[in-house]
Image (cartoon, helix red, strand yellow):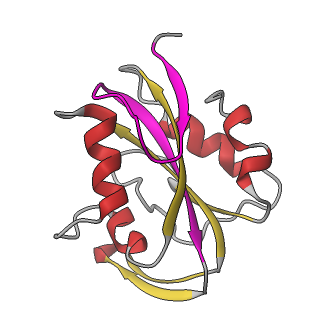
Amino acid sequence: MSGNVGWSAKQGLPARAGSYVLVLYLARTARLQIGRLGRFDFLAGWYLYTGSARGPGGLAARVSRHLHGASTLHWHIDYLRRVASVEEVWWREGVERRECEWAQAIGGWPGAKVIAPRFGASDCGCATHLWWVAANPFDIGSITLGAR
């Protein structure tokens, strides 16, 4: 297993390739249009979004874009970020793309639910890369995913 592992209160991520989980909180139920994916009713509560960072600036650049918002809506997560806050970021450095593995693991958590099928998963065969979770994800999340 290569690369550093970490969690962050949204700061200090490396400028190298890696995979990450955004821990988001949505205070109120919201109906959102997610680009061409469609319109969905997002339940209030906790969401976990898995992604990877391969481009210039690595994890630091990609996660910074998610944290500070984007002037153009490009990825599915950009639409949700307009109404949901990022509470924490879990990450692992390395060239391996772990977002699919992590998305599948989160989907196995008790009470995990797909709200928007194929969200963040247009380039793979996953059901979704965004899960609504019934329980507070800080209790088990990063330990289960091997990010702590």
Q: Residue at x 31, y 61 (%)?
A: 68
110 left or right, relative to 57: right
Up/down of 143 relative to 133, above or below: above
Looking at this view, is 122 or 33 the one in front? 33
* Residue 35 in view here: yes
Q: Name which residue lies at 34% across and 57% down.
A: 66
The answer to which image quadrant residue 101 occupies is top right
Q: How many marks?
A: 0
Position of residue 1 measured from the top left corner of the image (x, y, whole percent): 53, 10
* Image: 94 above or below 25: above
Please state if 130 lies on the left or on the right of 66 as rendered.
Answer: right
Segment colored magenta: 3-26
Report the side of 45 relative to 60 (left or right).
Answer: right
Residue 35 image point, x, y percent: 29, 76
Camera-nearest residue between 109 and 124: 109
Q: Residue at x 29, y 25 (%)?
A: 16
Magenta stretch contains residue 18: yes
Q: Can you give x and y, in whole percent of width and height, for residue 25 in the image?
A: 59, 68
Task: Judge by depth and name the residue closer to the eye, 98 or 48.
Answer: 48
